[in-house]
Each structure stands twice: as structure tokens, then as C-alpha cells.
DNA sequence: AAGTGATTGTACCACCTGGTTAATTACTGG
DNA sequence: CCAGTAATTAACCAGGTGGTACAATCACTT
């Protein structure tokens, strides 16, 4: 195991600066290279833990298995993270952070609101599909009723950011009179999230019921397009105004 | 514990006919009242297990805890269900059955397609909200990648039934020229499911991020309405045809 | 070169888990 | 009333779990 330890030091050496600035050690890199590299070890553990927890959930996720996936020993997990829950919380934090950093990459040109909205939806759709681990963690958190969600703020931040983006597009669209008025950006964001999230979260049961067609490349592309159309239809068209026919039945108000 | 056993026998006596017809014992009720009431015991276990599994998941769900919730002993669980997984499978089966029976209650008048669609969506929305246990099980199954979903057929059946219903409404709508052509009922069903499911599955994290407003009575009603409008807008209006503006950007095709 | 404090390895533990053994009771048919 | 079977109980077990005690090892100071 000692030999392996050396290897992770080298392996993680490139990422060291990141972790160090994170920990406010912007000076010169102490402890370069050789043994004893706490930041790398922690990140190593964190990655292993993310894998395990996102695959198996909190309770099923085994500390021993995580330790095995690590280049270090179980002892280190407890040394750095205290206990299982502490580790799990850090994993969630990290996943959120990664997710947010990913989302930050998107830049939109609002001058064409319809195009911007399509692009936003497409990005959200694909980004969700890429971040399966994150989504699994959110699912797990929901089953636990968000018990471990210590950093609600971080989570709120992600969504707030997304809503702000929607808002920008929506306002531009209203100004240009391509979107109808009176909608809330949160509502729009909710719809996009719901469909993009559901697409990956319920993949297993959906495949079980209907086969994998929907999850082929074409199927996904088509679905993405369909979501775009749905949201845009909602933004551009008010079924209540134009057709009173359906509202003669007031049982659903 | 013996005294408790008597009580469940009495307690479950009313439901006995159900279970007996289920088990094809339509004759007279043997073993009435007194002790030794297998059907009641099994149902008792099943209910306890549903509670435990839907709250805690498969792995976290403890057989011992289930046994404690039961009026019987742990041994009985293994006697009737073999092992943990066997029990879990039966729980899923039962939940599906309950869900399907609930869905079967809905009767729609297709002569007004818009109204029918609104009613269907409202029903789905509310039914999902009521069947939280079922939804939790589906979530758990998705986390496990539907590993335990032995009765895929049953699950497929539920959805197929729902799709058939959508199809009926949609066709009527197309005939009456209130819905546009070229949409697939599966697609429509998917949208409705996605939003209604997401509403309850992601309640915890959503509350954590935005507070509970969305889940107040008013909030839910408004959301339901919003989902109806979204789907109807999609059915009535084609954003691709009317506005070519947004499609000048072809990066999202 | 000894000391110091942060890190790491080894071996271990109490506890809880799913699952079982074997004996006992309640009931059935003859 | 008795033999046989179905239902039920209580005690038990091996294995794995999260978590630790303790000592060794390292980087770095003095």
C-alpha cells in the first residue's frame, strides 16, 4: 500500500493548486511530491465516496467499500471526515459545487429570446444527463427528506442562478412581445427542471415499462426538442384565453 | 404478544374476504376469528413493510424494524416471504396493484377533449400526491436501477393504460381540430407524468431551496393549473410553425 | 538529533443485520 | 381422540457494520 500512496501523490499533484487555494494556502506548495499529501488524500476519498454513495445511497454505501476504492485506509476517512455522515455531507457539497461550476459555463445571447430559451433548455437537458451522479444524490436526498442537506443555501443558490437566467430571457421575450405576460420565472424554471430531471431520474423504470427507445441518441434528441416546444408553447400561447371551450367544465379550478 | 395476536385477528377480520378471494379461497371463511390467521398476518406484515421500505429504502429498511411494527415476529416474515428481497418484491407488487386500482376509478367524457385533458391532468396530479408511498418506491427502484422490478409487466400495464386514456382524448381532440396533429400519446403522457411525479418526488429538495410555498394548498392548486396549461398549450399550439424567429439558430436541432 | 504535531497503518470491538434451528402450539381430517 | 400438518415462538448465529485504540511514521523545527 505504501507504493500506491506514492502514486496518488504524483497522480493528484496536478490538482494540488486547486485544493490549496481552496484551503487558503496560496503560498508556495509545501510538501510537494513525496509522501503525506492530505489534500490529495481527501480528494481521493471524496471521489471514492461520491461514487459509492451515488450508486448505493447513504445507508447502503459502505465505508469499507469506500476505503477499498481509496488508495488509503479506512482510518483516514475517519481522520478527515469524522464519521460516515460527515463524509456524506462533504460529498454532497462537492457535487453541488461541481454542478454549479458546470452551469456557470453557459452564456446566452438574450437578443433572440426564443433561441435563447431553446438553447437554455437544451443545455439544461444535456447537463442533467451528464451529471447523473449529482441527480442520484438529489434523489437520495429526497428519499431521506433532505435530512443531510446541510448546505441548503448552496442548493438554493444553484436554482436561484438558474431562475435569474430564465428571468432574463423571459423579460426580453416579453419586451419583444414574443412571450405572453404574467408568468413567473420560477414557474418556467420548475417546468424545465421537472422534465430534464425526470428524464434521467426515472430512466430505469421507464425503460422497464417501454424499452430503451427513448434513451437512444435519437430518442433523447427528440425528447429534448419536445421539451423545448412544450415550454415555448407555454410561453407564447395561453390556452385559457383563446379557447374557452375547455373551461366550460369548471370542476378543475 | 399472544393477546396482541388476538387483536389483529379481530382487526383484520373485516378485510379477510378480500384476501381470501385473492387467494382463491372463495368458500366459507375457515379459521374465523380465533387464532392462527395467515392471511391477516401476511397483510399485516406487508403493510408494515410498505411503510418501512417506502420510508427508508430497501437496504436501510430493517427486517427487525418491520418485525417490530408487526404484531407478529420476525420469523413469520421469513416463513411467508422467504427473505428480505421476497418481501420487498411483494410490497412493490401490492403498491402497484393499489395504484392501478386507484387509477381505474377515473372515467372521462371525451366529447370535450380540452376539458377531458384538464380533468385527466388534475386527476393524475392529485393521485400522485396521494400515492406518496408508491412514488417513493418508484424512486427507490430507480436508484437501484429497477433491479427488483420483477413485475415489469404490471408496471408497463399501468402506463399503457394511462397512455390509452391519453390517446383517446387526443384523438378526439384532433378530430374536433382543437389539438394539432402529429403528436404521440406516449409523449403527452410522459410530460404529464414527469411534472406530476417531480412535484412529489422532489418536494424535499425543492422546499429546501425555495421554502414550502409551492406545497401549500394554493401553491399546489396553482401548479396543477399551470401544468394543465402547459400541456394544453403544447397540444393546441405549435411553436415551430408560427414563429420561425427562434429557429434561425440551428444549434439545437 | 531529538522533539513535535500532523498523518497513517494495524488490529480490534461492540453491535446490529439478515437469516436459521428446533421445539411448541393450534388446528384439521379421519 | 389421535396423527399429521400448518402456524408460531424464542433463542441463536455467522458475518459485516461503523467506529476506535494505539503505536508507528513522516515533515519539519530547534
Image (tube, coloured by chain):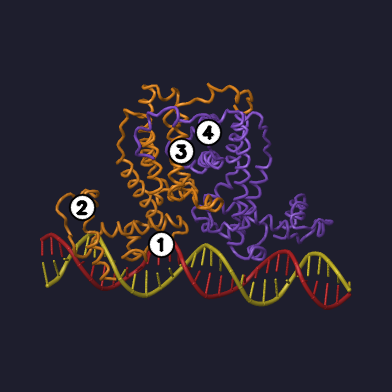
Chain colours: A orange, B purple, C yellow, D red
- Mark 3 chain: A
Question: Residue at image x 23%, y 67%?
Answer: A6
Dot 1 lies on which element? helix
Mark 1 = which residue? A63
* Distance from the alpha carbon under mark 3 to that under mark 4: 11 Å
Tell which of B39 and A101 is nearer to you.
Answer: A101
Q: Position of residue B21 (x, y in %)?
A: 77, 54
Q: Which quadrant of the view contains residue A127?
A: top left
Mark 2 = which residue? A17
- Tell me which label, 3 or 2, sits earlier in the chain: 2
Mark 4 = which residue? B231
- Mark 1 chain: A
Q: Which quadrant of the view contains residue A165?
A: top left
Q: Position of residue B25 (x, y in %)?
A: 79, 58
Q: Which mark is residue A227?
A: 3
> Badge 1: how crowded within 10 Å, few (<14), some, or many (20+)?
many
Amino acid at each position: 500500500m505504501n507504493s500506491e500512496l506514492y502514486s496518488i501523490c504524483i497522480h493528484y499533484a496536478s490538482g494540488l493548486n486547486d485544493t490549496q487555494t481552496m484551503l487558503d494556502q496560496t503560498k508556495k506548495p509545501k510538501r510537494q511530491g513525496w509522501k503525506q499529501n492530505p489534500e490529495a488524500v481527501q480528494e481521493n476519498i471524496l471521489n471514492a465516496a461520491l461514487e459509492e454513495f451515488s450508486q448505493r445511497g447513504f445507508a447502503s454505501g459502505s465505508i469499507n467499500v469506500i476505503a477499498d476504492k481509496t488508495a488509503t485506509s479506512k482510518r483516514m476517512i475517519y481522520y478527515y471526515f469524522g464519521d460516515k455522515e460527515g463524509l456524506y455531507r462533504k460529498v454532497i457539497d462537492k457535487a453541488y459545487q461541481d454542478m454549479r461550476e458546470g452551469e456557470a459555463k453557459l452564456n446566452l445571447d438574450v437578443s433572440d429570446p426564443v433561441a435563447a430559451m431553446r438553447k437554455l433548455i437544451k443545455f439544461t437537458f444535456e447537463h442533467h444527463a451528464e451529471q447523473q451522479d449529482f441527480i442520484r444524490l438529489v434523489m437520495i436526498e429526497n428519499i431521506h427528506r433532505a435530512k443531510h442537506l446541510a448546505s441548503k443555501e448552496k442548493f438554493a443558490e444553484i436554482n436561484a442562478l438558474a431562475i435569474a437566467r430564465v428571468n432574463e430571457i423571459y423579460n426580453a421575450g416579453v419586451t419583444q412581445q414574443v412571450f405572453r405576460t404574467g408568468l413567473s420565472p420560477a414557474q418556467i424554471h420548475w417546468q424545465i427542471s421537472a422534465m430534464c430531471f425526470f428524464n434521467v431520474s426515472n430512466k430505469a423504470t421507464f425503460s422497464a415499462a417501454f424499452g430503451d427507445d427513448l434513451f437512444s441518441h435519437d430518442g433523447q434528441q427528440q425528447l429534448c426538442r419536445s421539451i423545448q416546444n412544450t415550454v415555448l408553447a407555454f410561453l407564447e400561447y395561453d390556452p385559457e384565453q383563446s379557447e374557452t371551450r375547455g373551461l366550460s367544465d369548471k370542476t378543475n379550478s
